[in-house]
Amino acid sequence: MELILNNPNKEIQITCEEVKSMPKTKNKIPYFKTKNIKIFNEDILKIDSIPENSIDLIITSPPYNIDIHYNSHPDNLSYEEYLEFTQKWLKKCYSLVNESGRMCLNIPLDKNKGGQQSVGADITNIAKNVGWKYHSTIIWNEGNISRRTAWGSFMSASAPYVIAPVELILILYKNIWKKVGGSKKNDITKQEFMDWTNGVWTFSGQSKKGAGGHPAPFPIELPRRCIKLFSYVGDIILDPFLGSGTTLIATYLNNRKGIGIEMDKEYCDLAINRLKNEAKINQSTLIKEDGKK
């Protein structure tokens, strides 16, 4: 027996046996949840628990592919493999944001480990090819030039390394820059607005110890500024690479709804502990996937 599925461009014929062999999807319940926070112990490329066109703002810092020792993610891909991975998750995230949905993407300006690469420029081009529209770039002056260990040819024009002590926060949107829907309630002060619309942000990075030992944390100041500048109170914020949970802490403390995706269970637990300790989430409201508090 054959089934005919009507398609605007062509007819697709499939057999019942092929229908039976199609992969089944299962919407998983969150690994942890509260009234306004959900954490999924899943892979951003595989998750089907978040409705498309439902997210207001994405704030994330993806793996940099500089051989950081994560528990569950290889961080030493070839540069071509890394860009292919980037294309896949950017496309997935594009499907999750609403028409005026935005993304604040923290990425390196460039890198020299494993060969010089223009990471920021390459990821920007990939995002635009996926469908994201470019709005602007914030320069995060992390001020970590004192930690330099590579100079190339020291005090010689032979082969010096030029290293900028900054990272990028790429500001992207789906289709409409002016926000549609939402509470229309802003909580940013005049001084914050004046300071943060200056495209150079200067604040320190986050230590591993301060983030519970996660190998690649960013400071809460980064998502805090992005949340208040680019979202309304009550908006839904997503971090597809949750890590130690910093984005969700800022989300909860600033009266937004947060969703985090993290494929490593240990990091999920780390994020939960930080939410309890730093955001003061009531432990009695935390519900684990197995139903235990």
Image: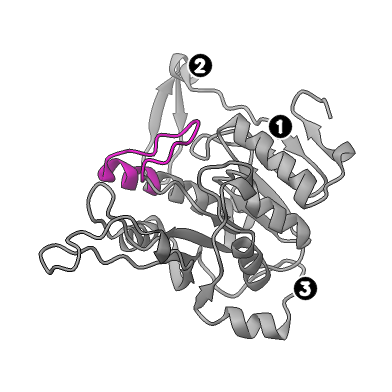
* Mark nearer the viewer, 2 or 3: 3
Q: What residue type is labelled 1?
A: Ile
Splitting the image into 4 quarters, where does residue 254 fall?
bottom right
| Residue reaching furthest to the front | 155
Residue underneath mark 3: 185
Residue underneath mark 2: 20
Query: Position of 284 compared to 184: left or right?
Result: right
Q: What residue type is labelled 2?
A: Lys
Q: Which residue is drawn at 54% across and 70% down?
A: 176
Q: Element at badge 2?
A: helix
Query: Position of 40 compared to 281: left or right?
Result: left
Number of other residues with Cα within 10 Å of mark 1, as a class: few under 14, some 14 to 19, many 20 or more: some
Q: Is the magenta stretch mostly helix, strand or loop?
A: loop
Q: Are marks 2 and 3 in contact (CB under 8 Å)?
A: no
Q: Can residue 54 be spotted in the picture? A: no
- The magenta segment is 66-86
Of residues 119 and 214, the one drawn nearer to the viewer in this rendering? 214
Q: Can residue 292 be spotted in the picture? A: yes
Q: Is residue 264 above or below residue 36?
A: above
Q: Element at badge 1?
A: loop
Query: Position of 69 compared to 274: left or right?
Result: left
Q: Which residue is drawn at 25% across and 60% down?
A: 151
